[in-house]
Structures are given as C-alpha cells and as structure tokens.
Image (cartoon, rainbow, N blue to C red):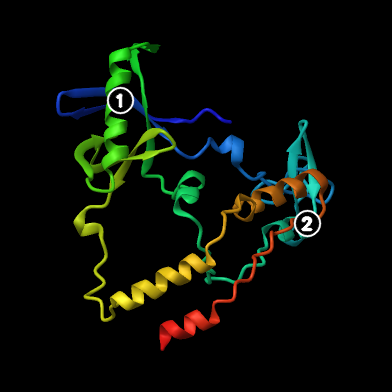
Amino acid sequence: MATPDTYVGQFTIHYGPATMIGGLCNIKAPASTNKAPAFKTLSPNGELVKQVYRDDDGNIFDRKETVKGIKRDDEWQIVSEDAIKAAKESALPKNIVTLDVHPKAEIDEALIPADSNRWIYVPRVKQGKEIIEDPTNDRWYSFLLATVEETQDEFSFIGRCNLRNTESTIRLSTFRGYLMVERMLHANEVAEFGAPWFESTPSDREKAAAIAAKVSRPYDERAHKDVRTERLIVAAESGVAPTVETPARPEVDVDDMLDSFLS
C-alpha cells in the first residue's frame, strides 16, 4: 500500500475546548503507484520521436509512420497500436449507466467519490521536520472522531478556513476510521434547477424500497476494479491486445414489481 501524499503538512481544528493538530493527506494514491503506462511516439525502428517527428539520427517521420512505445530498462520498446486501442476500449455503452443496488455499509467501506476536494485528516504534531508523540492530541482526535461517527446522521460539522490560500467552507465526515475534511461548494457555485415538477407519494416510496430490496446483492469489488489501467499494463508488457473478463451481472426478475409501480 502506497504512503499517501501530503496536501497540507499541518492543519488545526478547534472544537469547543478541544484543539487538534494534524495533516491533510490526499485520498488518491500517488500517481506512480496507480498510473497507466505512459506510451510515447516512436519511429518504426523503435527510436523515440520528438514533437517534430524527428528521431535521434535526424530521420523525419510523418505522423502515419510513427508508432507507440514505452521505456523499459533504459530502452524504448514498440507496443502495437492495436494492443493500446484494445486496452482503452470499453464494452459499456457511452453515456448510459445501469445501476445496481448494494448494501450501503459495503459501499461505504469499498468506494469513495473521486473528488480532489476531500482529504484524510491524520493526527500528528510536528516540531520542525520531526513528528513527535502527543497522547493528548491523539485523545482529542479520537474524541472528535467518535463525535462525528456517532452523530453525523443528525448533525453536520461545518467551519470556515483558509485552505492553501483559498477561503473555503469545510465539513468533517469520516472514512475508514479517520476524520475526513471535505471542501464544500459555496451557494453561488450551485446550479439552479428550478422547482421539481414531480413528486413521490408514500406508496411510491414503499414500492420503491421493496424493489431495491429485491434487486440488492452483495458488492463484488472485481466488477469495479481499474481494468483500463490493468489492460494498458498488459499491453505495455506483452505488446498484444489484452483479455480481461468482466464478472457477469446476475439477472433479477422484477418486471411485475416495476409494472406495479408504474400502474
């Protein structure tokens, strides 16, 4: 597991009589650990082609004559365009999503929104470049973590701060046993959609809940793994089009229930 990058080295939270000192860490792992291979444009003989499509020997190539490749062991190796294209292609239809229903507790432990405005707040006190032990700081952190965990369904923990020279409203939530700092949108940044012209009745909500319970199934992390990066790595290592199996989605017959909902 990669060590998280630091977004802010020291971040202080005041809550009533408590003061906590910690650092904000990026949720997303460093790019070097999860990034797809960087394919470069090479000449047909495997030399790196510059932006002007000229290799190190002075040979100039038309765009149609260039190929892609990756650097391995200080040498450039050609990877076929077909392998790269196949690795990038998706069998999913464009701009369409098929929703599955999973127990919320499983999703909360498996997924987190891909949002650069969320950071994990880690308790730590620094003196210069050294991190020192501070049991009192850890206790206050544990206190605030327990407070948010136990009451976040009822209360929101909101504050204003200057976060890296940007004045922001932040909210505290939790993630996998840590506090999480989330930057909130200002009111003027939220789009206006107008008053809803539709509504759901108590009967609608009851039927909808029954359908969701019917189609609910255990969350399968394999169905949501980063297969694109996996395919690109296979293409870079072998130079051939990769084959990645996608777990089949079980069919659940809810047609009668849906028809009942619409009737």
Element at label 1:
helix
- Left or right of 184? Residue 225 is right
x then y, percent, for residue 50 = 67, 46
Q: Please, what is the three-letter code of the amino acid marked with disc 1?
A: Tyr
Q: Please, what is the three-letter code of the amino acid marked with disc 2?
A: Thr
Image-quadrant location for residue 130: top left
| Whether residue 256 is situated above or below residue 42 in the rendered picture | below
* For discs 2 and 1, the disc positioned in front in the rendered view: 1
Q: Which mark is residue 253?
A: none
- Left or right of 217? Residue 248 is right
Crowdedness near tag 1: few (<14), some (14–19) or many (≥20) residues, C-alpha within 10 Å? many
x then y, percent, for residue 111 = 49, 48
- According to the picture, the residue beneath numbered tag 1 turns out to be 141
Image quarter of the N terminus = top right
- Pick whichever, 175 or 192, lies toward us: 175
Identify the residue at image location x=52%, y=27%: 3
- Pick whichever, 96 or 76, lies toward us: 96
- According to the picture, the residue beneath numbered tag 2 turns out to be 243
Of the two numbered discs 2 and 1 on the same chain, state the one appearing first in sequence. Answer: 1
